[in-house]
Image (cartoon, rainbow, N blue to C red):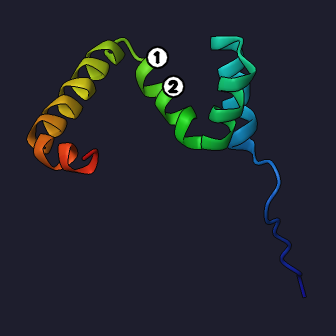
Amino acid sequence: MSKSVSTSGGIGLGSILAGIISWVTNHSIGWLIIHALLGWLYVFYYIVFYLFPWGIFLKILTIGVIAIILWAYRDKIKNVFK
């Protein structure tokens, strides 16, 4: 009979990899902490936006989509800050 062992909490591989990538890219402890908390999400972001040649196109596209969404909801956003 085999026993299954799992861990909960602690630092995972994604956090370590994200921290290493962040340090090599930014040389900042603050960004390292933020990116380590994001873990695999930051690793995926880095791979898509920095390692592929079409990454700059995706950055521009992402910024454009965010700008369109903010413009579409500008009245609701204004009401939040009243």
Q: Are marks 2 and 1 in contact (CB under 8 Å)?
A: yes
Look at 71% across and 40% down and name the residue there. 15
Quadrant of the drawing holding the N terminus: bottom right
Outermost residue to the bottom: 1
Q: Which mark is residue 27?
A: none
Q: Is residue 7 above or below residue 82?
A: below
Closer-to-camera residue (67/1)? 67
Residue 56 position within the rendered picture, expressed as x and y whole percent measured from the top left: 32, 13
Q: Which mark is residue 46?
A: 2
Residue 19 position within the rendered picture, expressed as x and y whole percent measured from the top left: 72, 29
Look at 88% across and 81% down and name the residue there. 3
Residue, disc 1: 50
Amino acid type at mark 2: Tyr
Q: Is residue 36 above or below residue 57?
A: below
Residue 65 relative to residue 22: left or right: left
The CA span between labels 2 and 1 is: 5 Å
Q: Secondary structure at mark 2?
A: helix
Closer-to-camera residue (53/63)? 63
Q: Is residue 56 above or below residue 11?
A: above
Look at 25% across and 18% down and name the residue there. 60
Residue 6 relative to residue 69: left or right: right
